[in-house]
Amino acid sequence: MQTNSNLLVLPRLWSFLSHSSSSVRKATLRTLQTLTEDDGDRSEDKRERWGEGGGIVLQEALRHVFQCALIEHITAIQDVAERVWENLVVQSDLELLLHAACPHVSTWLCLAMQPEHVPFNPNLLITVTSGVTKGAKNNQTVAYCDGQSDTGSNGGGGNVSATAKTLSELKMYIGGIETVALNVRKANVVQARCRASRMLGLLSHYVVQPAPGVIYPSDVPSPAICYAKVLLAHLNSRSALQRTVVGLTMSHWATVAPLKPPVVPDILSDRLLACLNECMYYDEIAASFTRLLHESRDYVATLKHYKLPVPVDVDSSGVMTLDQIAALAGKTIPTLCTAGANAGGAGNISSCSIPKLKPKLIESLEERRRALDIGAATTASQQQSLHVMSMAALAGAATMLHCLPQPPQPLNPLVKPLMEAIKREENEELQKLAAKHLSHLVDLCVDRKPSPNAKISTNLCTFLCSDVEFTPRIYSAGDSDTFDGILTLNNRQKHAERIAYNRGAGSGLGGGRGPGRPPTTEIPLEELLACEEPEAKAARTRRRGATLALTAIGCLFKSCKKIP
């Protein structure tokens, strides 16, 4: 590669990174990968490779590639973007890299924490400006497509939207542009966050290094302290997404130089361990939780108005927890009426003060109660998934950075979040990371006294065998009939039930047989499988997590002598 080639060639490629054809975007990133990779010329200085003013071009390259990794919805293109990022970070001069990356590190962290349903702020993104004609607008006009493949007729132009939009008009979300199908974007969100965290983890290894030729006085904070303060701002927040991204970034930071893990400042390691002992309601459920509180207060006021007993004790402030709201909505109106009548008969409340409610009023109150119950269950489920995700990321960061409590202090704050992710995390990529971090924790605890490894291995084996569809139960001959215990028969019956259930769930009872036609089966499978299916799903999640964890432990240890 000739000197200053990056300075001259790379800016010409920026406009192609937002091309409507996925093949063009992928080819552009491959070109960037070739131009930025190590060509084996040891005589060439890394700084000369970029030339004078190359820091601006390097900064633009980093911003474009990171933005591409967040917004691109095709995995193959994301993989190339990550390799280009690695070349830009590793193969660049350190001083040049620090000048280019440090002003945007906090912005990149915030972009990786973007909620999936909120578009990016255009002011935080880099757009390509082009002045083809004098007086023309400085926005590049492009058309985006939602195609899923890298190939297509007419260079992928057949899937392009009919109306071209400028970059300022298009909404960009994490996981895809606005023209990408919603289900594709949603499936790509976690992958984009994990990829961005890997990229920032790699960059973290370099931004904490002292700038070449700079002497830091004792009263000036070191680069490591400055970077720790950037991360602390997110660890001090009540956002699960912020804590998750910071945790994943720190865990990947520790893997850049595995033989020499980074020495993090005490303010960061202490805060990391403190986060593992916190329990809070996250900002992500603030809107739904506030709505639930208002509905609960109205519901309580309505119960008091009709002189019905309130199932929970509510203080004067009216603030309730999710558990209290669930308990409030758990008692049906007929039950409350019966309880109120019994209380009146016992003399606690005058029986004449409990009026007989009309059926329509009871039905109306029951609908409100059911809506409150569903809202409480949904919010509680969201809170639990956020808690499992964020705590596992933080525990993984503490493990990979070797920020363990000193013995004989228990390791429960680290072990429990990782085991919860193995048990409950529905996203496979996050579960893989939790399994990897758990294997490293087991490795660190081989010689620790007391060691949690025996209990961890026992629980993993229990999780592995908890899926009865994969691990059959053993019955004694006297406890079952002739056909019990035939695994193939049981699996085929359950598979047939699922097929019938999915057909029925797709379009009501008819399940795709057309309006007015009878259902494919007379058995109400929605009711039959309503209780069984969530439990089967949870069992499959536990088995998958245990499989990933045991596989990661085996790959890390490689020797059966050390495995617990």
Image: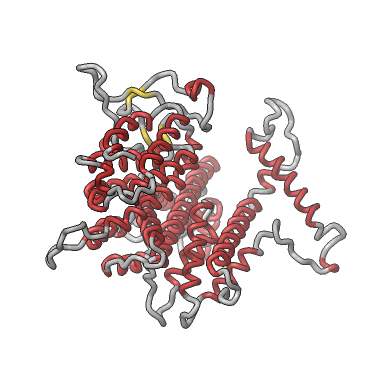
User: Where, quadrant-wise, is the C terminus in this rendering?
Assistant: bottom right
Q: Please tell me in which quadrant of the rendered image residue 81 appears.
A: top left
In the rendered image, residue 498, in percent from the top left (x then y), is placed at 70, 44
Q: Is residue 409 above or below residue 353?
A: below
Q: Residue at x 74, y 42 (%)?
A: 523
In the rendered image, residue 54, in percent from the top left (x then y), is placed at 24, 41
In the rendered image, residue 519, in percent from the top left (x then y), is placed at 73, 34
Q: Is residue 318 above or below residue 475?
A: above
In the rendered image, residue 180, in percent from the top left (x then y), is placed at 46, 32
User: Residue 376 versus residue 246: which sits nearer the camera?
Assistant: 246
Q: How is the image coloured?
A: secondary structure
Q: Is residue 140 above or below residue 470?
A: above
User: Residue 320 versus residue 229: which sits nearer the camera?
Assistant: 229
User: Where, quadrant-wise, is the N terminus in this rendering?
Assistant: top left
Q: Residue at x 25, y 62 (%)?
A: 224
What is the count of numbered marks? 0
Farthest residue in the right direction? 482
User: Residue 68 versus residue 62: which sits nearer the camera?
Assistant: 62
Q: Is residue 140 left or right of residue 502?
A: left
Q: Is residue 278 above or below residue 160?
A: below
Farthest residue in the front direction? 43
Q: Is residue 27 left or right of residue 4?
A: right
Q: Residue at x 47, y 42 (%)?
A: 188
